[in-house]
Image: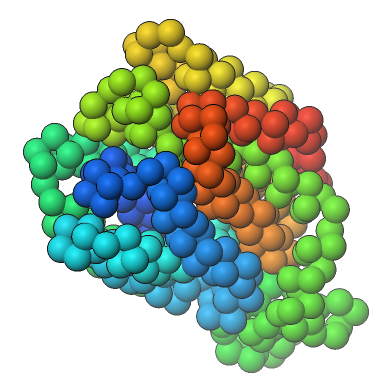
Amino acid sequence: MTTTATAAAEVTAWRNAVVVAYGASGLAFASWVSRLPAIRDGLDLTPGNIGMLLLCMTLGSFISVSASGLIVLRLGSTRTIRTGSIMVGCGLAIAGFGTSVLATPVAVAVGLAITGLGTASWNTASNVEGAAVERAVGRHIMPRLHGAFSLGTVAGAGLGAWAAAASVPVLWHLAAAGAVVAVSVTTAAAWFRADVTPVTGERTYVPDTFEDPSTGPIPVITPGAAQADGVPLDNKRKIAQAWRDKRTLLLGVMVLGLALAEGAAGDWVALALADGHGQTDAAGAAGYGLFVTFMTVGRFAGTLVLDRFGRVPVMRWCAALAVLGLGLFVFAPVPWLAFVALAIWGLGASLGFPVGMSAAADDPAKAAARVSVVSTIGYGAFLCGPPLLGLLAEHVGILHSLLAVMVMLVMSFLLSPVARKIP
């Protein structure tokens, strides 16, 4: 096999391994989300109680995502993803044990907190790894990588709907899902290459020098060092510079609104269908499955749409569709129309994260730090918003609490121009 063919095969294996990481993350998320009605019934929780339970996961996730940039720069994306997937697997099992055996919200809260700690840094590292493989492939594949996440959520929601209909104990369901997630991701991580692929100005794990046939030994940047005027920058300074970059911050806010739309659907659609539209728990899980199915359609179509129309028009249409779908879902006079609304809502929320990650990685030399910043802002909304909606639902009901998401979607619409590709 020629050197070119070998390199192409390595990139393909790398891409496939990253797909597994994204898909497993979606499976983990949808597995516990789809069983929220069963967790609620098993523990006799009110919407406010559920919001507080989700807040435990949010606290763990917020701690993890806040430090995710430093964690990835310190450990590398491979070790971060492996560690995070194992934590998520353990957290799911603990949450299931707390529901089915101990029947106490405290144990479930501990399991969700561990899941949150593992998920946030894992997902940030996946975005760094995804941006790197996108550069290696030379195509806009980030929407399809996030499409793999959506496929994972479709699979997880489908299994969750089946488990709910078949009355499978939450323990056995979540423990099995956790084991699949941990084993598949730790195995796939052997093919990750972001930590060992040289990028000018980025951190790499390679020997101190390499031989160039024409010039002899050339120094290679060592861990933790981007360069400015020949002076290494430590990891904290790299992150600080990214947080001071105006475009990066605005990208984060743009992603924030669409991420909140996605996160609110994930945590509350099943319950909103059950309590607001009078559907069964199984129908609620199926409704969430419909939402993520259309998110998946949007993400796999995203590469072609973005190539033809560009990031800015696509982001505007996404925000507009999300507003339309969300409003129609809340005010649907009949259940079937609520399911139609979920399809529109899913399409609208589909491309916020992938486009934000690609835009943050436009400058390869600063990609890791900027991707971590946009991920932190986006996941902050994804994680913090839904529990707060639970508290709001105590006063206005689950359905009407979702209207608060529209404010942030309007902001995403207005900030769409910041996603324009920089030369």
State which quarter of the image contains the N terminus.
Answer: bottom left
Residue 123 location (% of width, % of height): 49, 59
Residue 48 location (% of width, % of height): 46, 46
Residue at point 45%, 76% (across, down): 79
The quarter of the displayed image where residue 104 is located: bottom left
- Asked whether 122 or 76 is in front, the reply is 122
Against 83, residue 384 (above or below) is: above
The quarter of the displayed image where residue 401 is located: top right
Against 94, residue 71 (above or below) is: below
Q: Is residue 115 visible?
A: no
Residue 101 location (% of width, % of height): 15, 63
Q: Residue furthest front?
A: 395
Residue at point 30%, 67% (across, down): 107
The quarter of the displayed image where residue 257 is located: top right
Q: Residue furthest top?
A: 333
Q: Residue furthest right?
A: 229
Residue 411 location (% of width, % of height): 75, 34
Residue at point 79%, 85% (across, down): 232
